[in-house]
Amino acid sequence: MPRTLKLTIAYDGTDFHGWQIQPALPTIQGELERVLGEIEGHPVAIAGSGRTDAGVHALAQVASLRLVNPIPAANLRRAVNRLLPPSIRVLEVEEAAPDFHARYAARSKLYEYRLWRAEVCPPMMWRYVYHHPYPLDLAAMAETAPLLEGTHDFRSLASVDDSATEEESCVRTIFSSRLEVNRDLLYYRVRGSGFLHHMVRNIVGTLLEVGKGNLALADIPRILESGDRTQAGPTVPARGLFLVEVEY
Amino acid sequence: MPRTLKLTIAYDGTDFHGWQIQPALPTIQGELERVLGEIEGHPVAIAGSGRTDAGVHALAQVASLRLVNPIPAANLRRAVNRLLPPSIRVLEVEEAAPDFHARYAARSKLYEYRLWRAEVCPPMMWRYVYHHPYPLDLAAMAETAPLLEGTHDFRSLASVDDSATEEESCVRTIFSSRLEVNRDLLYYRVRGSGFLHHMVRNIVGTLLEVGKGNLALADIPRILESGDRTQAGPTVPARGLFLVEVEY
């Protein structure tokens, strides 16, 4: 009987074409399935809590899989990390209930977006922030961020690909949406039941429009109601985005 | 009449073959000379405070050069950073005395070596630390580090290439040599009048031998006196080393 395992994984997304496996392209899922398949001795399928796009990072992505190999969890972690590139690390391996599935069981996710405001972006930081050395009305942005909280139809903040599939619901619940400033670093943290494709990056792009004075706080309810992607701000770069936590 | 400029530069050394210009290989000096030559309109020579090896990083390397172009310092910084790769950043451009030379005028340098002790090395950190998840006697290492302070012949801690040139003096003065531990990060900081090739990495390799119990505090004076490279510890990886500051 195979056992079910829960993996907690951190990665630097810079050099990967996102989470989801793709033929002939380096992806996080692809690397994990390659390495775990090697240990198991035949192909293994890994389910992530959700996809992350090319260039997006994770501090604690969660994935589930079934394995026949009886290797103890701590040894499995060591073996997997020895075979993975250093930009992907398995932080934890835990035995899980037989029916545990990283995607279906997820209750909420926390994302963080990092923006660097000083004129010069340190060379050790450019992979992990969006460099934006231009004036912003931070007070207006901080006041606007919580307006996204609650249960809304987020169609206007999803990538157009997604809004095209009209049948699927774009209703999601955001539990917390906050902006924080620490010297030259601006953090946007959002916890929600689930996120549409590009949703966090489009929210940040919209908050930036508020910071630049192109949109006002009062525009947010209108944008949400419109269901029209063109009303919201642009998609900010992937490199500033981190999947911080998945709650079960 | 050309003006003399002092540049303060940070870089992530991971993808470069060190500071010094080499034909057909990416180097820090090579990138800077390419970009400044483009701005000046003809080739420009840049003098660094010293070379850093392949993979070594800098938080504040200093370089000097002469430029005919009258562009204001702040605009030059902006123009240079626009043309450089994001892993090299000019932090400051200052007008300097006509005879200022980054190498000859340097009075001291501060280096820092970073070692990561936990079993798993975070993916955002592997470029900037030496991952060493093995037991170490930190108290013995911390007690040993200051023994390097003072004026000594450091031949036994220089790369064999350098000790081969018997005519050159290997006498240097170390003002401060200290170990510090912050949770899973071990820092070694050393400030000195100058450093021989591989000297900081060989000192750290020697301190690690003390930490493993293969050498004792009392062996340090003997190693220094021997002038014999084989008595000291191995050269630790470049990726943990940072040039932190150059004093003038």
Image (cartoon, coloured by chain):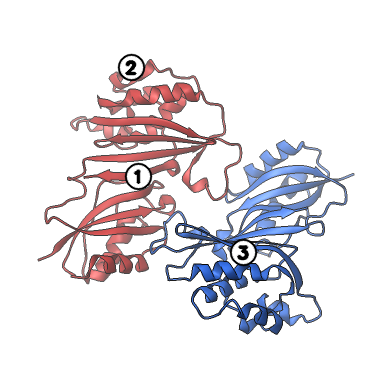
Chain colours: A red, B blue
Query: CA–CA distance between discs 2 and 3?
Result: 54 Å
Report how far apart the C-alphas of labels 1 and 2 lie in the structure.
Answer: 30 Å
Would you name the residue on which mark 3 appears?
B17
Above or below, A41 against A224 in this view is below
For badge 2, the amino acid type reads: Arg
Q: Which amino acid does label 3 sit on?
A: His
Report which residue position mark 2 lands on. Answer: A222
Depth check, front residue: B202 or B19: B202
Q: Where is residue B100 in the image (x, y as percent from the top left)?
A: 84, 51
Q: Which element type, helix, strand or loop, lies under badge 1?
A: strand
Judge by depth and name the residue closer to the eye, A120 or A24. A120
**Measuring 25% from the left and 67% from the top, which residue is drawn there?**
A37
Disc 2: host chain: A
Which residue sits furthest right? B1
Q: Callout 1, which amino acid?
A: Val
Mark 1: give few (<14), some (14-19) or many (20+) Cα within 10 Å: some
In which quarter of the view is residue A21 placed?
Answer: bottom left
In the rendering, at what x and y percent does residue A217 appear?
A: 40, 18
* Residue A91 in the figure: left or right of residue A101: right
Q: In this view, does B23 lie above or below A140?
A: below
Q: Identify the residue under disc 1.
A: A244
Residue B169 % position (x, y)? 79, 75
